[in-house]
Amino acid sequence: MGARDDALTSIEICAGAGGQAIGLHQAGFKHLALVEIDQYAAATLRRNIAHRDGWEFERDFCDIIEGDVNDFKPTVQLEKAVKFLGHSVKEGELDLLAGGVPCPPFSHAGKQLGKDDERDLFPRMLQLVDELRPKAVMIENVRGIKDDKFTEYRDWVEARLQGGMAVDPVTGIRSELPGAGYKVCGWEVLEASDFGVPQLRPRAILVAIRADIPGVDDFQWPVPNAKVTTVGQALDETMEERYQPFIAKGGALGQKAAKALKDWRRDATGIAPTLVGGSKKHGGADLGPSRAKAAWAKLGVNALGVANAPKDVLKKDSADRDLFRAGGPMLTVTQAAIIQGFPAEWDFEGDPSEGRLPGKTAQYRQVGNAFPPPVARVVGEAIAKVLRGPRTEGAQAGN
């Protein structure tokens, strides 16, 4: 099978559990490769692509590469993609190269070492741009990269793409860079709650489109929604499902469950604070630092941990911990994922060696570190509109 003219192809690095992949998929992109180093996140991608409706293309033609992106060789490593393209990925053929490169080098929650952090993958992303010369590039990171202390670094990234004066982050030498033939359409901070996500999660997104693409000057950043989705609106159905088995028992327990649900609905009228994925070096999952926990408390949620799945609550008799604490219920992994903008049916793989709570911490970390799919979707749609312009015009001319 050869590549179809109407298919927008993409390769994504640092794919995580699929937040960006879901959004770009919804925007019309067909993934040829998803690269992720974390074994549980890679397993999550494999599990969902294997059986989700609408992901038939990826089942047939997308390579899920579990490994370090520094070792990723797209022109020789992809196997399934060859069946779609009819050949190995060629320079200039790919429509979109995307990636949510690691945020710790620029996060306010970390040391903000920037270029001096070994986890900085901007250089690798730019190497892949040079190698693949995709029609468009999308890079996602935390808002901290827009801080003044990283101005020089951002200027270097942009100059590598579109040319200009910049200071090399390794040598410290300022020089004129030729660029890679792109126009940087902007490096904007988008707030997730402006696009239907019930969470305050600002993300810095860089979009660059190859300068030879017709309509490159027509790219427009997505416009925020006027309507805000609250935690209560997003989680009402799943929270009722968690309490309903206890309400159905009737008696004192049923009354207790009904009151707990009513109290949560009364309080869950705002937007959630930013979910934090945490580090493998630290302990179990919770919903963030002290300030975030206080914000969650105002929404009727106990943020000291993550609840068991509803079926496990009944088996393990953990209802007092998960549902009936004075501070309100804890969120399940599924509910945290909904707060992040994932579809409710998206499954997350975890580490079965975690003992009595199998996989929960590994699952939650994937959720907390994710890029909200609705934000990826609106940016992807804006990019797709530019890339589809020439194809649409060509199709009309041929009629």
Image: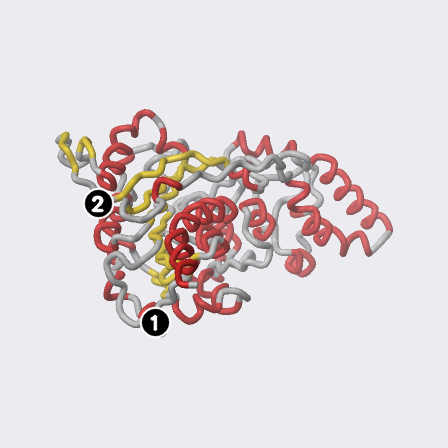
Q: Is residue 39 visible?
A: no
Q: Residue at x 44, y 38 (%)?
A: 221
- Looking at the image, is mark 1 or mark 2 nearer the viewer? 1
Q: Position of residue 302 (x, y in %)?
A: 63, 39
Q: Residue at x 43, y 66 (%)?
A: 58
Foreground residue among 200 and 8:
8
In the rendered view, tell whether residue 275 sits above or below residue 152.
below
Task: Locate residue 299: give its quadrant.
Answer: top right
Q: Residue at x 51, y 39 (%)?
A: 192
What amino acid is found at the position of numbered circle 2 in the picture? Ala
Foreground residue among 324 and 151:
151
Q: In which quadrant is the C terminus drawn?
A: bottom left
Mark number, residue 2: 1
Task: Tell me if 329 is positioned left or right of 132 in this view.
Answer: right
Dot 2 crowding, Cα within 10 Å, few <14, some 14–19, many 20+:
some
Mark number, residue 236: none
- Identify the coloring: secondary structure
Give SS at disc 1: loop
Q: Which residue is mark 2?
A: 180
Spatial CA span between label 1 and label 2:
28 Å
Task: Locate residue 225: give its quadrant.
Answer: top right
Q: Position of residue 104 (x, y in %)?
A: 36, 39
Outermost residue, right side = 251
Give SS at disc 2: loop
Task: Tell me if 209 is positioned left or right of 339 in this view.
Answer: left
Outermost residue, top side = 148
Q: Residue at x 56, y 38 (%)?
A: 199
In the rendered view, tell whether residue 68 sits above or below residue 194.
below
First in sequence, mark 1 or 2: give its number.
1
What amino acid is found at the position of numbered circle 1 in the picture? Gly
Q: Is residue 6 visible?
A: yes
